[in-house]
């Protein structure tokens, strides 16, 4: 059955709500593929859905390897497991990388909103040295204090995951559903189909 709404989105929101007492419920794994063809995986934080959509927002540092990977291959897969409700979501799709050089003013506004929606402590992390690079000193580097009212730092990057397929597995009920998106007949909106598959 095809539907223009995202039937998996409510399942995910319910899982987030029912596991919200667990701090780790807002963390999931994001896997990318680099230019070497090897996979790379890391834990990221769910920053909500883009307004009125099923696209998922992630904040990251533009100097990280995941950005290099996404420039090589713009597809990624998320894996989210909720320990209390025993639900797993594997979500894959195309990732839009929005950094300060993006020419679209609407996307730049979206990046700025994401920046100010982030805690001051999280924003301060973008002042640090390049992530994943060799540490040249034993002492922590002193960084300039962050102006709380200033806009996004150059290193701040917003990722928008546009889901194309969602594999939902409820281990308590042994129910597994595959949700797949297709373009509608007019090609302007996404339609979702779902089918039960074996666990």
Image: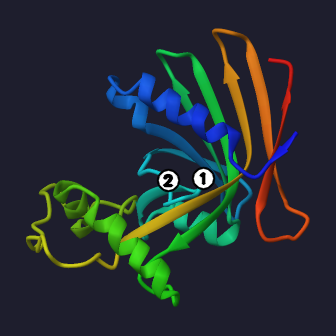
Q: Position of residue 22 (x, y in %)?
A: 35, 24
Q: Position of residue 107 (x, y in %)?
A: 48, 78
Q: Position of residue 72 (x, y in %)?
A: 68, 70
Residue drawn at x 19%, y 63% is 124
Which residue appears farthest toward the right when viewing the image?
185
Image quarter of the N terminus: top right
Label 1 secondary element: loop
Residue drawn at x 24%, y 78% is 151
Which tag, 2 or 1, sits closer to the chain's start? 2
Mark 2, residue position = 49
Q: Does residue 21 sit above or below 91 in this rendering?
A: above
Residue 1 left/right relative to 47: right
Looking at this view, is 45 or 63 the one in front? 45
Q: Does residue 194 sit above or below 180 in this rendering?
A: above
Looking at this view, is 77 or 178 the one in front? 178
Q: Which mark is residue 54?
A: 1
Q: Quadrant of residue 171?
A: top right
Whether pointer 2 and pointer 1 mark residues with C-beta atoms closer than 8 Å, the reply is yes
Q: Which mark is residue 139?
A: none
Looking at this view, is 130 or 100 the one in front? 100
Q: Is residue 166 visible?
A: yes
Q: Residues within 10 Å of mark 2 (few under 14, many from 20)?
A: some
């Amino acid at each position: 059955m095809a539907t223009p709404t995202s039937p998996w989105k409510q399942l995910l929101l319910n899982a987030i709500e029912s596991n919200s007492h667990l701090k780790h419920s807002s963390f999931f794994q994001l896997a990318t593929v680099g230019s070497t063809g090897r996979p790379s995986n890391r834990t990221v934080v769910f920053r909500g859905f883009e307004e009125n959509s099923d696209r998922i927002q992630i904040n990251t540092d533009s100097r990280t390897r995941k950005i290099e990977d996404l420039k090589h291959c713009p597809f990624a897969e998320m894996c989210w497991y909720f320990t209390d409700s025993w639900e797993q979501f594997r979500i894959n799709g195309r990732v839009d990388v929005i950094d300060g050089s993006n020419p679209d003013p609407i996307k730049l506004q979206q990046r700025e909103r994401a920046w100010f929606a982030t805690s001051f402590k999280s924003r301060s992390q973008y002042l640090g040295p390049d992530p994943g690079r060799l540490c040249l000193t034993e002492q922590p580097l002193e960084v300039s204090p962050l102006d709380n009212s200033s806009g996004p730092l150059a290193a701040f990057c917003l990722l928008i995951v546009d889901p194309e397929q969602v594999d939902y597995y409820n281990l308590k009920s042994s129910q597994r559903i595959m949700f797949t998106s297709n373009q509608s007949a007019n090609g302007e909106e996404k339609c979702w189909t779902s089918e039960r598959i074996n666990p």
